[in-house]
Image (cartoon, rainbow, N blue to C red):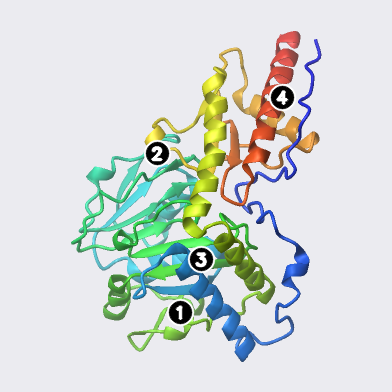
Amino acid sequence: MAIKEPAARPDNARFSSGPCAKPPTFDVTQLSDAPLGRSHRAAVGKSRLKAAIDGTRDVLGIPADYRIGIVPASDTGAVEMAMWNLLGARKVEMLAWESFGAGWVTDVVKQLKLDADVKTADYGEIVDLASADTDNDVVFTWNGTTSGVRVPNGDWIKAERAGLTICDATSAAFAQDLPWDKLDVTTFSWQKVLGGEAAHGMLILSPRAVERLESYTPDWPLPKIFRLTKAGKLIDGIFEGATINTPSMLAVEDYLKALDWARSVGGLQGLMGRANANTKAVADFVELHDWIDFLAHDPATLSNTSVCLKFTDDRIKDGAGFAKAIAKRLEAEEVAFDIGAYRDAPPGLRIWCGGTVETSDVEALLPWIEWAYQTEIEAQLATA
């Protein structure tokens, strides 16, 4: 029996976890003032880059004595710059519970060849944070973009610690309350929570991280694109808008407009509220249906941005095939684009719920997930 399609559709079907939906007020004509065809080292270029740094500090509430730099290669570039420059001075602990954290483990163990203490957890779970010793250097993701699991708080990080905390916060910044006093290096990319354009990363350093940079030289060579110091001193220009390589001024302008929009919805608190409302809509749906659940096992660690779901109906024989078929149906109906689980994650769906997504769109999507599930399960049973 054919199942009736829902009447309402999302106004914006973009629920991808990266690049993510742009702010709902976005219009490409807003970027007409971008200084295209001008040097990024000219006064106009430097002023835009400095405005991006200052706006980041303002919206995120980053302490005045922390340094903020715009660096190449998105969040990946920022994390790797931090690891290549800072690690090796102390014992290292690597905490990983999803694919990107696992990637940082590979870099440290196989590329830098450090004898790291590696602590891992399966998708949907998180490592025992209390077991981490922050007198060592600790590398971790705050929000597992591919697992839907986030760090609940920074209580496990000692205020008086000897090591550095290096935090990949790319799908947490602008949606979750990051404890800056507990984070020595923090990274994120523009294309996540604020829906900016790709290729640029943000590198945020505490005074303790700067002290390490200026007192320690790693044993391995650093390519020019990674170098943060010169003659034993921090290259201040990187943290004032003089980027290492040529940035896209169009992408910078887009980020500036996204920051303006963030302020218009109440800044960080407003963005967090929007993400929480989106996630609550999904949670209410999950509560009402016994065939779907969160991948995250503990509600305290449930992400409010990259919300990962799994199908729990034991009649499903091919979990990966079933989840792909659901995502394909939703895309064909143009009600949800790019919401299949990450390739390394367990089969399921991943709905981006960051602040640039309207709650009304999440609410309109959920009946379509039920429609796709019922349609696909009927088709599967009919051919069994």
N-term mark: 4 or 1: 1
> Could you tell me how far apart the alpha carbons at marks 1 and 2 are, in whole angstroms?
33 Å
Give the image quarter of residue 66. bottom left
- Which residue carries the number 4 mark? 372
**First in sequence: mark 3 or mark 4?**
3
Question: Disc number at residue 324?
Answer: none
Across and down, in percent, residue 53 comes to 50, 74
Query: Residue 220: x and y, percent?
Result: 37, 72
SS at mark 1 in the image? helix
Q: Which residue is mark 3?
A: 77
Amino acid type, callout 4: Ala
Q: Residue at left 75%, top 9%?
A: 382
Q: Can you see residue 28?
A: yes
Relative depth, front residue between 345 and 304: 304
At horizontal 33% and vertical 61% (from top left) the residue drawn is: 183
Q: Secondary structure at mark 3?
A: helix
- Report if the CB atoms under discs 3 and 4 are less than 8 Å apart: no
Q: Amino acid at mark 2?
A: Thr
Amino acid at dot 3: Gly
Determine the CA span between mark 3 and mark 1: 15 Å
Check the image and report above or below for 284 versus 3: below
Q: Which residue is mark 2?
A: 301
Residue at the spot of label 1: 239
| Image quadrant containing the C terminus | top right
Q: Is residue 345 visible?
A: no
Cα distance between the residues tagged 2 and 3: 26 Å
